[in-house]
Amino acid sequence: MDFAFAAKVFAALFAIMNPIANLPIFLSFTSGMKEAEQRRTAILVSLTVAVGCLVSVFAGNAILGFFGLDVDHFRLAGGLIVLLIALSMLHGEDSATHGGSSAEKATFNNASNVAFYPLAIPMLLGPGTISALIVYAHTAGRTDQFLALGLGLVAFLLLLSATLIAAPFIGRVVSPTVMSVTKRLMGMVLAAIAMEMLVASLRALFPGLV
């Protein structure tokens, strides 16, 4: 098994969804709930993200094919999206791509179930996450690395679930400074991943540049 590829998938998902940096958002949306209800919400968020990730992995390339899109063009667009998210994180800001626009944020508190919207979609499972998963699924399909992709994905989903379920405890222990530093560190990792996606797509689209 290619553990390096599994680690790359895990790192990309951790950097994009960043469970630690998103803890305050989860806690703010569930602040009026009892701990049992918070845990139930955390499980629903995790299940929704898991289903969305699986759909992206197994159906992403088919959806691209249906619209007549080439994966290299999609990788280029996905790399740009991921880079924009990374730059927002490096500035200590929440990306509108995943966090929603000002108009969308105004509707968040009126959502019938915050586990699905906005916590799972778009805050965790947004365009950046979907783009990365489709690109990695395409890479795994060409290089027989589906087992490594599955390992990286499952490892992250388990970490995400554990983090959200333990959110009330972690929120009391982890300081805002740690969360801020984590966001910027993950921004650097995400920027590197975005550049890798961009360079790979440019090499495929313009072989004369190699």
Image: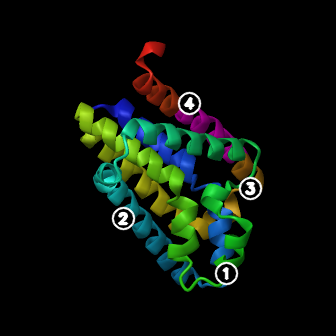
Q: Is residue 210 visible?
A: no
Q: Residue furthest front?
A: 68
Q: Are marks 1 and 4 in contact (CB under 8 Å)?
A: no
Callout 2 crowding tier (Cα within 10 Å): few <14, some 14–19, many ≥20: few
**Residue position for label 4:** 195
Of circles 4 and 3, the one toward us is: 4
Q: Which residue is mark 3?
A: 175
Numbered disc 1: secondary structure = loop
Crowd around label 1: few <14 · some 14–19 · many ≥20 (10 Å): few
x 38%, y 49%: residue = 153
Which of the two discs, 3 and 2, labels the residue nearer the N terminus? Answer: 2
Residue 63 on image: x %, y %: 33, 55
Residue 206 visible in the shown view: yes
Q: Nearer the viewer, residue 140 or 164?
A: 140
Q: Amino acid at mark 2?
A: Val
Of the two numbered discs 4 and 2 on the same chain, state the one appearing first in sequence.
2
Can you say which quadrant of the picture contains the N terminus?
top left
Q: CA distance from mark 2 to mark 1?
A: 24 Å
Q: Give the image location of residue 136, x and y in percent.
A: 37, 41
Count of residue discs: 4
Amino acid type, residue under disc 3 in the picture: Ser
Residue 109: which disc? 1
**Does residue 169 lie above or below 1 as drawn?**
below
Using the numbered discs, state the Cα–Cα distance from disc 1 to disc 4 in whole angstroms. Answer: 35 Å
Q: Secondary structure at mark 2?
A: helix
Residue drawn at x 45%, y 74% as measured from the top left? 44
Magenta stretch in the rendered image:
181-194
Helix, strand or loop at mark 3: loop
